[in-house]
Amino acid sequence: MTFTPVRVRQRNYNFDLSEKKKLLILARETSQASVCKLYKIPKGTLSGWKNQIDLDLDYEKGKFTMHPGRKSIGEHLENVIDSFIEGQEQGQKECSVDLIAFEILKFDPEFQDGIFWKTKKWLYPYLHRSGFSIRSKTHVAQKECDNDLMFQFNDYVNEINAALKIHPDFVINMDETPCYYDNRPKTKVVTSGSKSVNGAKTRTGDYRATVCLAATASGKKLEPFIIFKGQPGKTNN
């Protein structure tokens, strides 16, 4: 294969596409260093041309194509991702990269060869391009109660109680909360201008008991039930 001499320019970015192709083919047949030295082209510039132009085709017949770039994932998959994120936000549910990756593989099991970690790796730059960011939580609020679901559950419990003839005194709602032995305040009163605020805790500062609070459906409050950490068969002091 013969090459037409390429006119040397003062600035390497003035080469047109046909000249770039000829130089890349010449570098493939000889060496990249010799072409860079002969035509005064930086190695980084020649490598950049190499990534832009596809030389895997039959270059002897002059069939060249520009690099196709990033492969499109399709509108259907984009709609699935956007709808899932929007639905999670409206439902006040957590939306993480893992959940989105699971949703993608559920929609298209062959995406990224069906490999979970590959899907996550692809997802990070996609979210960045789409205007999303992954951030730590700055505020955790109480989730709004679903009133319809609460009323349905209440009616369901009342129907069971009426069918089994269960007295309201035996329908109990119970919750538990930790109670620490050493109640340390989070703030401390000190002199203005103090450089540091020191605190102290006892050896049992992290020890706690579990307090159970319960009430019946008839409106009676039961006595608190306290659970201490211990071992079976031994008495707690």
Image (spheres, grey):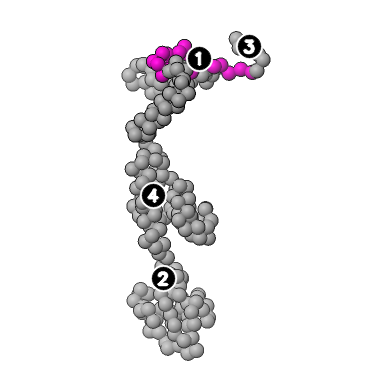
Mark closer to the chain start, 2 or 1: 2
* Residue situated furthest top in the rendering: 237
Could you give the CA–CA distance between mark 3 and mark 2, rounded to whole angstroms?
75 Å
Please give the label number shown on residue 225: 1
Looking at the image, residue 134 lies above or below residue 29: above
Q: Secondary structure at mark 4?
A: helix
Mark closer to the chain start, 3 or 4: 4
Please give the label number shown on residue 56: none
Could you give the CA–CA distance between mark 3 and mark 4, rounded to whole angstroms?
54 Å
Which residue is the site of mark 4?
A: 84
Check disc 1: other Cα within 10 Å, few if <14, some if 14-19, many if 20+.
few
- Are the residues flagged by discs 2 and 1 in contact, CB closer than 8 Å? no
- The image quarter containing residue 187 is top left
Could you give the CA–CA distance between mark 3 and mark 1, rounded to whole angstroms?
17 Å
Which residue is the site of mark 3?
A: 235
The answer to whether residue 43 is left or right of residue 13 is right
Image position, residue 59 (x, y; %) = 47, 83
Mark closer to the chain start, 2 or 4: 2
Q: Give the camera-side residue of 182 and 159.
A: 159
- The span shown in magenta is 212-231
Amino acid bearing label 4:
Phe
Given this view, does label 3 or label 2 mark the residue nearer the observer? 3
Taking the spot 38% from the left edge, 23% from the top edge, the residue there is 195
Given this view, does label 2 or label 1 mark the residue nearer the observer? 1
Could you give the CA–CA distance between mark 4 and mark 1, rounded to whole angstroms?
44 Å
Amino acid bearing label 2:
Pro
* Residue situated furthest right in the rendering: 233
